[in-house]
Structure formats: C-alpha cells, structure tokens
Amino acid sequence: MDKLTVISGCLFLAADIFAIASVANPDWINIGESGGSLTLGLIRQCQTIHGRDRTCTPPRLPGEWITVLLFIILGIISLTVTCGLVVMSHWHREASRYARWIAFTGMILFCMAAFIFPIGFYINEVGGQPYKLPNNTVVGSSYVLFILSIFFTIVGLLFAGKVCLPG
C-alpha cells in the first residue's frame, strides 16, 4: 500500500468520523432567544431556559431535513465501505478503484444534503425562509463538522485519483 492510498484512507476515515459526529450532535442550528437558547439537530433538539439544565427531545423534522438525514446516513455508509476497501486494497490492488467510486457516491450524497438543508429554514422553530436564516439564528458546530466531512471527502478523492491513474 503506497503513501497516497494511506493518506486517502485517513482522509476518508476523518470525513466519516466528522459526518457521524455531525449527525449525533444536536447543534446544526443555534437559536438565541431571550432567556434561553435552542439548538436544532437532525436527531435531537435541545433547549436551555434561564440557565436551567439542558433538555433534549426528538425533533419534528420537515421533509427536507428527513431527506438530508437519509443522504448523510447513506454517505456515512459509503465512506465506511470506502475505508474497508482502502484497507482491502493492501491485498487486492483493484479494490482501490471501487473505493474511489464509492467515495465519489458519498461525496455526491453529502453535497446534495448540503444543498437541501437550508431549504428547511422556514420551520417555526427557526422562523426564516429557505436559504435565509433570521438575525438571531446561526449555524452550529455540527453543520461545520458536516462541511468539513465534505472537504475531507473531496481531498481524499483527489489523493485516491492519483493512486488510480492508469500507469
């Protein structure tokens, strides 16, 4: 296994970990309200009122965010399979070619999720419009982790492309 394969495998693994962390953390959107705060995630929403303990509940997701969650889960599965194929390419060189295409599929799924997510800003909890957040609302750390997973997937694909060039 050459250095570029190891680098691309590490980048795909990092992207996979960041994507899993972004889904698990309920900090996709932060809404600052008077006397408290609300963080919305794809599997939980949490609220803190006047310094009390934070309470978390399952959110009522709009259809757009359910689609985003589905795309991200499929992308995570793609990257997990890719990592397995990169390891397998140590013994079977042709596995790196399949890893590249499956990672490309994961990247497409992540990019579609990133494009669809802002459409859901219209929900009552956020109070914005598609692609436009209100002034008291910002994207949270989970969204940043998700964008980093897209970045690492793309860079990993660049390294994997160097490995798979015909020679």
Image: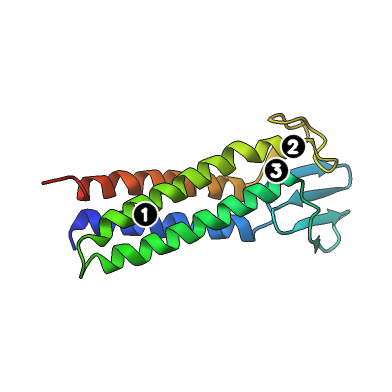
Residue 129 against residue 138 in the figure, above or below: above
Nearer to us in this view, 121 or 77: 77
Which amino acid does the dot numbered 3 rest on? Glu
Q: Is residue 29 left or right of residue 38?
A: left
CA separation in Å, label 2 and label 1: 31 Å
Which amino acid does the dot numbered 2 rest on? Phe
**How many residues crowd mark 3 within 10 Å: few (<14), some (14–19), many (20+)?**
some
Residue wearing tag 3:
64
Q: Is residue 67 left or right of residue 20?
A: right
- Asked which secondary structure carries label 1, the reply is helix
Q: For residue 12, which quarter of the picture?
A: bottom left
* Picture coordinates of residue 17, whole percent (x, y): 48, 60
**How many residues crowd mark 1 within 10 Å: few (<14), some (14–19), many (20+)?**
many
**How many residues crowd mark 2 within 10 Å: few (<14), some (14–19), many (20+)?**
many
Residue wearing tag 2:
121
Q: Is residue 147 left or right of residue 13?
A: right
- Asked which secondary structure carries label 3, the reply is helix
Residue wearing tag 1:
11
Query: Is residue 1 something one can see in this rendering?
Result: yes
Which image quadrant: the N terminus? bottom left
- Asked which secondary structure carries label 2, the reply is helix
CA separation in Å, label 3 and label 2: 10 Å
Depth check, mark 3 against mark 2: the one in front is: 3
Q: Earlier in the sequence, mark 2 or mark 1?
A: 1
Q: For residue 115, which quarter of the picture?
A: top right
Disc 3 and disc 2 in contact, CB within 8 angstroms: no
Residue at x-position 15% and y-position 45%: 166
